[in-house]
């Protein structure tokens, strides 16, 4: 039986309330996690992919919800992907949402009619306006990058993680996963001021969601060897996985999802280059990722 995922318009009010509840502003991942938790969305629903992935259907529909909330004047977003509530959003009530959505759709259709008069065969202005708003809200380069990462072999992806950790200051990172190191793909030493400690990492090239069991298994593999773990995935983490990673009384596990991984690769210029303009251009370097494949 197919898993039913709420429609984007069912997320309009929950998404707005999530931003308000987070202090009036939120990153995309914070907003997504808050809505998932508040709505009690099951891990099964969280794992449904949009098309062939790597984006999940929940992420895709929440992206549309954010786009509509922006068009309705209730949210705004910065170039860094931080969403914040407007004065109008603060004052809105749940019963206002249907009318505001209808007004926004009517306005875009009206604009569409004006543009159609300028020439036949042009794309719908409704599509253009919404697609442009979504393009401004979401960094589409991340989707392209995640597609590249998903095409890498496991060994190449582990080498990429090794390179990232080295750039981030981890000393002597080594890949151990190919030798069957009990679920640990690599290790290194991180030094902070006068102290240093071992760090273990595991890579999961997933297009879906990583659940709490993966966090528990990784923590079990680290038992007796160290207390600092890093779990890296191209996908997302369920809310249960996030809670398990921070569970009281257990060694913490830091989680890097696909969105954060893309940001880190861009930050350290690993296979990603940027061109500074008024708007930043981001260009992928596919040859770099292919160079990581074992010869």
Image: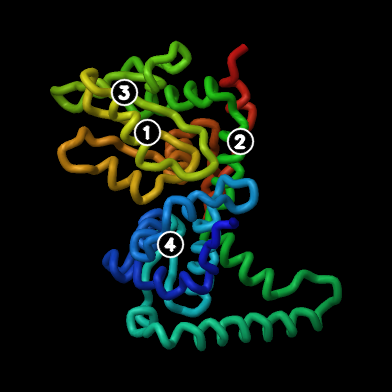
**Dot 4 corresponds to which residue?**
78
Task: Answer with the quarter of the image where residue 3 lies.
Answer: bottom right
Query: Which structural element holds mark 4?
Result: loop
Q: Nearer the viewer, mark 3 or mark 2?
A: 3
Q: Which residue is mark 3?
A: 221
Q: Nearer the viewer, mark 1 or mark 2?
A: 1
Q: Position of residue 152 (x, y in %)?
A: 59, 28
What is the CA distance from the residue labelled 4 to the residue labelled 1? 28 Å
State which mark lies toward you, 3 or 1: 3
Spatial distance from mark 2 to mark 4, Cα to Cα? 26 Å
Label ID, residue 271? none
Q: Are marks 1 and 2 in contact (CB under 8 Å)?
A: no
**Circle 2 — which element?**
helix
Q: Residue at x 53, y 82 (%)?
A: 101
Query: Which residue is pictured at 24% across the width and 18% down the height?
Result: 225
Left or right of residue 83: residue 287: right
User: Mark 3 Cα within 10 Å, few/some/many (few <14, many 20+)?
Assistant: some
Q: Looking at the figure, which quarter contains the N terminus?
A: bottom right
Lower sequence index among marks 1 and 2: 2
Q: Are marks 3 and 1 in contact (CB under 8 Å)?
A: no
Name which residue lies at 53% across and 62% down: 5
Image position, residue 276 (x, y; %) = 52, 47
Label located before the other in sequence (2 or 4): 4
- Viewed as shown, does residue 267 lie left or right of 225? right
């Amino acid at each position: 039986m197919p898993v039913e995922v709420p429609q984007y318009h069912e997320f309009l009010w929950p998404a707005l309330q999530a931003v308000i509840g987070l202090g009036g502003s939120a990153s995309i991942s914070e907003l997504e996690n808050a809505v998932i938790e508040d709505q009690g969305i099951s891990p099964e629903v969280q794992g449904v992919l949009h098309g062939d992935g790597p984006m999940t259907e929940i992420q895709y529909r929440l992206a549309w919800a954010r786009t509509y909330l922006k068009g309705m004047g209730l949210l705004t977003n910065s170039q860094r992907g931080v969403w914040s509530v407007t004065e109008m959003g603060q004052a809105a009530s749940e019963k206002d949402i249907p009318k505001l959505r209808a007004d926004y759709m009517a306005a875009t259709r009206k604009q569409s009619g004006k543009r159609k008069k300028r020439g036949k065969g042009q794309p719908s202005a409704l599509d253009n306006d919404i697609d442009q708003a979504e393009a401004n809200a979401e960094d589409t380069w991340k989707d392209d990058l995640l597609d590249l990462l998903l095409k890498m072999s496991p060994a190449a992806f582990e080498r990429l993680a090794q390179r990232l950790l080295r750039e981030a200051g981890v000393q002597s990172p080594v890949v151990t996963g190919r030798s069957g190191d009990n679920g640990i793909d690599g290790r290194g030493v991180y030094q902070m001021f006068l102290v240093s400690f071992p760090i273990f990492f595991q890579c999961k090239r997933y297009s879906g969601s990583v659940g709490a069991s993966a966090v528990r298994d990784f923590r079990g593999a680290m038992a007796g060897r160290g207390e600092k773990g890093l779990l890296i995935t191209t996908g997302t983490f369920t809310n249960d996985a996030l809670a398990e990673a921070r569970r009281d009384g257990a060694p913490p596990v830091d989680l890097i999802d696909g969105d954060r991984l893309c940001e880190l690769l861009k930050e350290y210029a690993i296979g990603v280059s940027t061109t500074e303009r008024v708007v930043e251009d981001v260009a992928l370097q596919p040859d770099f990722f292919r160079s990581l494949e074992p010869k």
